[in-house]
């Protein structure tokens, strides 16, 4: 079956530091890949997505590239802000299905 | 404003009680979902519905039931058969049943057994 593995947190950074959150997946065929963000006490919001190999999703300074050869979709941001503190979830959906398989989430804490 | 509304935000259940969590969307989406979130475990799929009057079990459906009588509504009942119901419940919807479609989430309901 499908599975998503992402690095455990919390990840603690100072403002303006570089961020990487690793995500690898197992799936048959060609899944779509997503990063969702959850702020405290709230639901999830889509941050970015990629639907085929070598696609790069980007939004709000965050980027992730769909790497089929390494089955990875690592999240990066060049300069984090305090407001980026949240829990980040990597997720996938199989081709033809819209149900999501999530990783366990990575908490990011950014200090001034 | 279009979106997904979950209610209540907090819910307390006594042992042996059934409780129903509400989820309403005004996005005109066909597909709706219920996920359960536990600390450190990510989100797990409980039930999903591709279309009105149809729904399927997800990975952890035991102890839960749903209905989809209207396109905009997908209530979840947590029955007394659910052994460990304390969790954060998230409802979501997507425009269509397709792998590359964005899911929109509600604000969640936090259920606590007392």
Image (cartoon, rainbow, N blue to C red):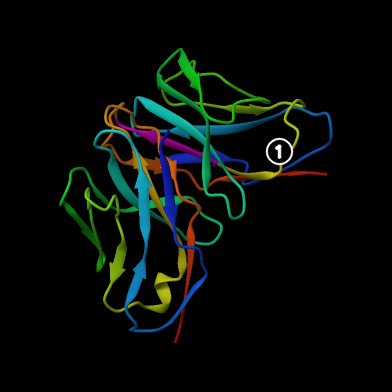
**Count the marks: how many?**
1
Name above or below for residue A7 compared with residue B97: below
Q: Main secondary structure of the magenta part?
A: strand
What's the residue at 29%, 68% (across, down)?
A76
- Quadrant showing the N terminus of chain B: top left
Q: Residue furthest front?
A: A69
What's the residue at 32%, 78% (across, down)?
A18
Towards the viewer: B27 or A19:
A19
Q: Position of residue B52 (x, y in %)?
A: 42, 16
Q: Position of residue B72 (x, y in %)?
A: 43, 26
Q: Position of residue B95 (x, y in %)?
A: 30, 31
Q: Does residue A68 show up magenta in the picture?
A: no
What's the residue at 34%, 82% (across, down)?
A17
Towards the viewer: A38 or B20:
A38
Residue assigned mark 1:
B85
Which image quadrant for residue B11?
A: top right
Q: Position of residue A19 (x, y in %)?
A: 34, 73
Q: Residue furthest left?
A: A54
Q: Does residue B91 show up magenta in the picture?
A: yes
Residue B3 seen anywhere in this rendered image of the structure:
no
Specify whether A100 is left or right of A66.
right
- Quadrant showing the C terminus of chain B: top right
Q: Secondary structure at mark 1?
A: loop
Q: Residue furthest top?
A: B53
Name above or below for residue A88 compared with residue A10: above
Look at the image and give the residue range highlighted in magenta.
Answer: B90-95
Towards the viewer: A15 or A68:
A68
Residue A45 seen anywhere in this rendered image of the structure:
yes
Specify whether A32 is left or right of A88.
left
The disc numbered 1 marks a residue on which chain?
Answer: B
């Amino acid at each position: 079956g499908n599975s998503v593995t992402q690095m455990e947190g919390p990840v603690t950074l100072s403002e303006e530091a570089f961020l990487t959150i690793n995500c690898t997946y197992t799936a048959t065929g060609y899944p779509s890949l997503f990063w969702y963000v959850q702020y405290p006490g709230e639901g999830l919001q889509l941050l970015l997505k990629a639907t085929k190999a070598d696609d790069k999703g980007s939004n709000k300074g965050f980027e992730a590239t769909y790497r089929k050869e390494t089955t990875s979709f690592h999240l990066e941001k060049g300069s984090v802000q305090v407001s980026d503190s949240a829990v980040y979830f990597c997720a996938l959906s199989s081709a033809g299905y819209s149900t999501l398989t999530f990783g366990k989430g990575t908490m990011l804490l950014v200090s001034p | 404003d279009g979106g997904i509304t979950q209610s209540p935000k907090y819910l307390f259940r006594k042992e042996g009680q059934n409780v129903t969590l509400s989820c309403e969307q005004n996005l005109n989406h066909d597909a709706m979902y219920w996920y359960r979130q536990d600390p450190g475990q990510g989100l797990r799929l409980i039930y999903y519905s591709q279309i009105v009057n149809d729904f399927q079990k997800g990975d952890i459906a035991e102890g839960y039931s749903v209905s989809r009588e209207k396109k905009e509504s997908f209530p979840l009942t947590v029955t007394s058969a659910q052994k460990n119901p304390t969790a954060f419940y998230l409802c979501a919807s997507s425009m269509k049943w397709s792998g590359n479609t964005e899911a929109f989430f509600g604000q969640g309901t936090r259920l606590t057994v007392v």
